[in-house]
């Protein structure tokens, strides 16, 4: 049997061996976040794939717009690489021009030195020295000849070095030019693939619209799209309930009302609460006019809760900002973040598109607080300035 003194010793040892409470809480939170991240990814796949399996046209549209998103993203990445490559080439051209100027300068100085030597009569050094009687003149002559010889040697060495450097720069220019050509060829191939995918998508969208018109199912389709979105948001609420409030988010979105930047610049084509045609459900967000491929920025820091295709929304991204705040970005051309990733305010998360069967490009933007949509106009900057 342990005495009270022995129990005290055991308890002291246990507390000494245990990590601090805040460290335990941090590790537990990290494990919970990792688990939630995996659940978000699984949920994203399930919700994206489980619906519309019986609707062949919608399934084809989803596949087409996903493919467009991937090709478009690759094309933009290639364009950035090509631009960087051209900058490197421009820098190498500048190096080459500087080396050419240096070589020309050294050559001109060398010619001047040779001319100076011949100006002394072209006499060999020994003969010139023997012809002098004045020791002071002899000393000056020796110093001058030595100076000319050293100067010529230095100029010749500098020319050789510049020529070696020039050869290296020329080799790099050839390599970089070949790489730029490869990037341009790859970008052209991706552009052709993108054009092909977009043509196929136009055919699919026309077929869908004709099908809806013949069946009179536009209203039912809109209601079904809203049901899918609501189902997705409810499922995300259940998953995100395991994430501690503001985990990783430095400031609550609620503290920034009226000061949040917009996800993209542009006028609002559709306002919050506007009625839809044919008596469909009212708009719960806004549609912002923006060019195809324009950058979409996260309006606040948070975790990507969903990043995939959803009927009616196309390529959709949902970001959870903690404290029950969500932002939705729909109809994108391509997505740049995956479910579970953290983003900061102003991060590039997508590019504007017309996915979801839209006729023209634009960004759907929705802001939700505790499960209810709110008007983004009352939360975002009045000057329309984008986030970042």
Image: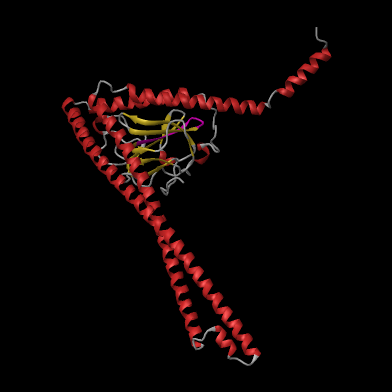
x, y percent for residue 235? 42, 23
Image quarter (top left, top right, bottom left or bottom right) of the N terminus: top right
Left or right of 146 in this view: 222: left
In the image, 82 versus 369, the foreground residue is: 82
Q: In the current view of this chain or complex, which residue is farthest to the bottom? A: 133
Most extreme residue toward the top is 1
- Look at 33% across and 21% down and name the residue there: 50
Which residue occupies the extreme left position in the image?
214
Between 39 and 263, which is closer to the camera in this rendering?
Answer: 39
Q: Specify whether residue 263 is painted magenta.
A: no
Q: Give x and y (percent) for residue 359.
A: 24, 38
Residue 127: % across, % down? 55, 87
- Residue 86 drawn at (x, y percent): 38, 55
What color scheme is it? secondary structure
Q: Decide whether the magenta segment is chiefly helix, strand or loop.
A: strand
Left/right placement of residue 188 relative to residue 319 reads left
Q: Residue at x 55, y 32 (%)?
A: 247
Q: Residue at x 57, y 84 (%)?
A: 126
Question: Is residue 323 a member of the stretch shown in magenta?
Answer: yes
Dividing the picture into quarters, in which one does residue 139 lie?
bottom right
User: How many numbered discs sit on the rendered protein?
Assistant: 0
Please indicate, yes or no, whether residue 355 appears anywhere in the rendered image.
Answer: no
- Answer with the quarter of the image where residue 361 lies: top left
* Residue 308 appears in the figure: yes
Position above or below: 323 against 158: above
* Magenta part of the chain: 322-330
Residue 147 versus residue 72 in the image, above or below:
below
The quadrant holding residue 372 is top left
Task: Residue at 35%, 38% (x, y): give it.
Answer: 334
């Amino acid at each position: 049997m342990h005495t009270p003194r022995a129990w005290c010793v055991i308890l002291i040892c246990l507390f000494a061996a245990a990590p601090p409470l805040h460290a335990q809480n941090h590790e537990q939170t990290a494990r919970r976040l990792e688990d939630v991240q995996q659940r978000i990814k699984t949920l994203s796949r399930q919700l994206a794939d489980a619906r519309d399996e019986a609707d062949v046209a919608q399934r084809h549209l989803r596949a087409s717009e996903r493919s467009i998103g991937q090709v478009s993203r690759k094309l933009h990445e290639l364009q950035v690489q090509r631009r960087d490559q051209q900058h490197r080439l421009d820098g190498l051209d500048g190096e080459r021009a500087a080396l050419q100027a240096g070589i020309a300068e050294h050559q001109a100085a060398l010619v001047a030195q040779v001319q100076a030597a011949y100006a002394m009569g072209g006499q060999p050094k020994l003969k010139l020295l023997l012809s002098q009687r004045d020791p002071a003149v002899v000393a000056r002559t020796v110093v001058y000849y030595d100076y000319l010889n050293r100067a010529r040697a230095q100029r010749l060495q500098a020319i050789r070095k510049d020529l070696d450097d020039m050869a290296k720069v020329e080799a790099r220019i050839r390599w970089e030019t070949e790489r730029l050509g490869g990037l341009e060829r790859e970008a052209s191939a991706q552009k052709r693939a993108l054009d092909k995918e977009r043509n196929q998508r136009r055919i699919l969208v026309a077929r869908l619209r004709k099908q809806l018109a013949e069946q009179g199912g536009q209203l039912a389709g809109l209601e079904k799209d809203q049901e899918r979105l609501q189902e997705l948001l409810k499922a995300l609420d259940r998953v995100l309930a395991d994430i501690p409030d503001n985990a990783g988010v430095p400031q609550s979105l609620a503290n920034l009302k009226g000061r949040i930047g917009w996800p993209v610049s542009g006028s609002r084509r559709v306002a919050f609460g506007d009625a839809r045609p044919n008596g469909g459900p009212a708009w719960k967000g806004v549609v912002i006019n923006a060019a195809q491929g324009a950058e979409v920025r996260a309006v606040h820091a948070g975790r990507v809760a969903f990043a995939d295709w959803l009927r009616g929304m196309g390529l959709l991204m949902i970001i959870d900002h903690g404290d029950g705040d969500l932002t939705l970005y729909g109809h994108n051309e391509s997505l740049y973040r995956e479910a579970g990733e953290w983003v900061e305010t102003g991060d590039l998360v997508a590019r504007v598109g017309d996915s979801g069967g839209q006729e023209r490009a634009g960004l759907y933007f929705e802001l939700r607080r505790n499960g209810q949509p709110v008007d983004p106009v009352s939360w975002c900057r009045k000057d329309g300035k984008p986030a970042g």
